Image (cartoon, helix red, strand yellow):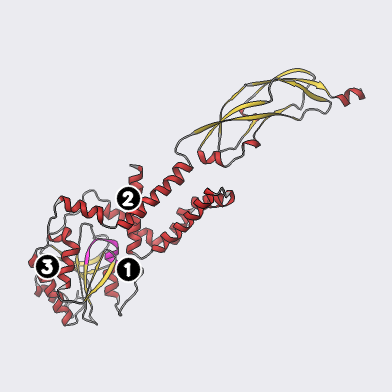
Amino acid sequence: MDIVIVGFLIYGFLLLLQRTHSRFIINGISILLGIYFVARYFDLYLTSILFQTFFTFLVVILVVIFQKELRNFFEWIYIWGRFFPQKTASYSESITDQIIDASHQLAQKHIGALMILPGKQMIDMLTQGGIGLHGRLSVSLLLSIFDPSSPGHDGAIIIEGDRVKKFGVHLPLAERFDPEGGFGTRHRAALGLAERSDALVIVISEEKGTISVAHEGRLKTLHRSDELKEFIRESLQEKHLSRSPEKSRWYSLLTHNIREKILAGAFTLLFWYMFVVQLGTGVLSHDYEVPVEFRFLPQEYIISKQSTDTIIVTLSGRNQDFSLFAPTQMRVVVNLPEAKAGYQRVRIDTSMISHPASLSVIKFTPGFVDFTVGTAPAAGKAK
């Protein structure tokens, strides 16, 4: 379930990047991940540490640099994340023919128009303004709405089933719009909605008299008279024209956007390796043989005998914490600033064991050290 949820989020983010033409983000992150794994494979300690620090602040960096893309992503998640999406309106052949007929007449007269056929995703949060109409769709109604003398002809209309739900609607503009063939704001608005939803937007150019369609983040100009009907049938058959069999819907789900699904799976596995395998999901423990070291012993004394030279210390922590420290630097330090000659016993506690702050001492054995403090030879001669 953990992998499925992360994979779904990455898949949605990839689809959004594809629609908004922001693939360079994935390219840059892929290069950085590649360098990081190469550094890990060849045990490049400094490079690994630098990249781990970078990945720690990666979220902040993405928020600062890619504010608009992330905003679109959250809008997309809200729309797609609805457990009960809105029912898709049914578009009969006669309704489709009237839309196509009106589109061709508007194109021949060089009258600009925007027509929205919503899909399964809600578009209410993506559109602004508009006047409710709920009129029965007809060619004459469409021509009258987009007549240049009509007050709402510059906006878009929303068609649901056999009704024109609204007219004079304003659409979000595409963030990265490369005008090909001199297309302007009307086409940019159509692409802007197609980038953020599964709606089909039909756009007629006032200057060129051409018909274009915006769908799934792409804008395509149609050149044949029958191409619009073919496009609607091929692109929106499952959503609008008919109820496809269950088998067809599952087949479409599995076969669409294969490349994005593969990339999402690959990134999910990479993140699993980085944050689960490398960092560890649970607490690990390791035993170390740590030498006993006596410090601050007065110069006239020496340690002549001791019960043990090492203490077995068990440390607990995450896998990544164990890989970033050197066990040879550990010591069990016994401070003897006020030592006196003779046999002594010191009980070991955690404060005497030097270890990284990221790791915890679970246990150690033995729990005490017996030793004998004797007089140093040089001090004996002098005396």
* Residue at numbered disc 2: 8
Q: Nearer the viewer, residue 318 or 173?
A: 318
Residue 359 on the magenta segment: no
Would you call the spot at circle 3 few (<14 residues within 10 Å), some (14-19), or many (20 or more)? some
Residue type marked 1: Ala
Would you call the spot at circle 2 few (<14 residues within 10 Å), some (14-19), or many (20 or more)? some
At x 38% / y 61%, what residue is drawn? 69
Q: Which mark is residue 204?
A: none
Q: Nearer the viewer, residue 15 or 68?
A: 15
* Residue at numbered disc 3: 96
Assign a secondary structure to mark 1.
loop
Question: Quadrant location of the C terminus?
Answer: top right
Range drawn in magenta: 192-200
Q: Residue furthest left?
A: 94
Question: Quadrant location of the N terminus?
Answer: top left
Residue type marked 2: Phe
- Asked whether, in this view, residue 203 is left or right of residue 307, the answer is left
* Residue at numbered disc 1: 174
Assign a secondary structure to mark 2.
helix
Q: Nearer the viewer, residue 247 or 275?
A: 247
- Determine whether 47 is above or below 360 in the image: below
